[in-house]
Amino acid sequence: MTLGVTSTFLVRGSVGFALVLGALAACGSSSGADASMDGNCPLVVEIGGASSSPPFTVFQAGDLAAMILGFQGFQMLSLDVRVAGSSASTVDLTAFLVIPDTGVEASGTRRGGGEASGDALLVTDFLLFFNDAPLSQIGGHDADLEIIARSGGCVGGGRVRIHLRDEPPCIDPDAYVPDVTSRDAGVPDGAVLCSP
């Protein structure tokens, strides 16, 4: 009798285990997105400074990157990112920036978006904010910038070392909304509009 009970549990356990294995195998093979996360479709990620006019210009090591002063006094970088290698119509971006000399770090995420640009997606005006660091610890320093892209189950990244401009930050004319009662309301002293 004990043998019968044990064999029943073994059979049930084997069937249950086989069902779990079958479900896991089906999950792993039914989705191209899952299969591609292992590097079968790496994305090519190019990082550039935001520009109001084409063409997209890729940052080269040591290129100057202008800080922008937002309408509420936020210091930020505005980046353009081109991602190739996915057939999806959108891309998610995560950025990490470290200034080795001062230890300042910044990170940001942008979900979805991207416009078709040839065989790639172009994300414009990806903003990376420096909310808690004084300008003296940002401007005039080299920064290591990395962006990770995810699109259609594919993953890729790009890295570049840029030099953050050591000038008073300019104000993005598209982000600045002047107060109707004062010409320079909300604009920090010494700030200038960014050139187009």
Image: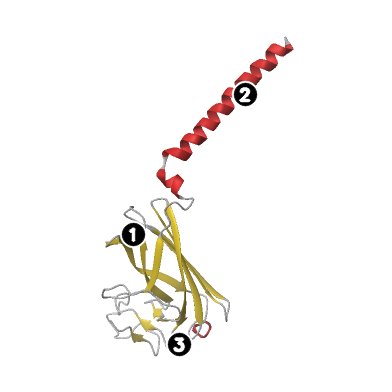
Residue 54 position within the rendered picture, expressed as x and y whole percent measured from the top left: 26, 73
Residue at 51 percent across and 86 percent down: it is: 136
Residue at 58 percent across and 77 percent down: it is: 103
Residue at 73 percent across and 12 percent down: it is: 2
Residue 9 position within the rendered picture, expressed as x and y whole percent measured from the top left: 65, 19
Label 2 sits on a secondary structure element that is helix
Q: Are dots 3 and 1 in contact, CB under 8 Å?
A: no
Q: Is 178 drawn above or below residue 83 in the view shown?
A: below
Residue type pointed to by label 3 = Asp
Question: Could you give the CA–CA distance between mark 3 and mark 2, rounded to whole angstroms?
Answer: 68 Å
Label 3 sits on a secondary structure element that is loop
Question: Could you give the CA–CA distance between mark 3 and mark 1, rounded to whole angstroms?
Answer: 31 Å
Residue 109 position within the rendered picture, expressed as x and y whole percent measured from the top left: 44, 63
Residue type pointed to by label 1 = Gly
Residue type pointed to by label 2 = Gly
Residue at 45 percent across and 38 percent down: it is: 29
Say which label, 1 or 2, has the lower sequence index. Answer: 2
Residue 56 position within the rendered picture, expressed as x and y whole percent measured from the top left: 31, 72
Front one among 129 and 154 = 154
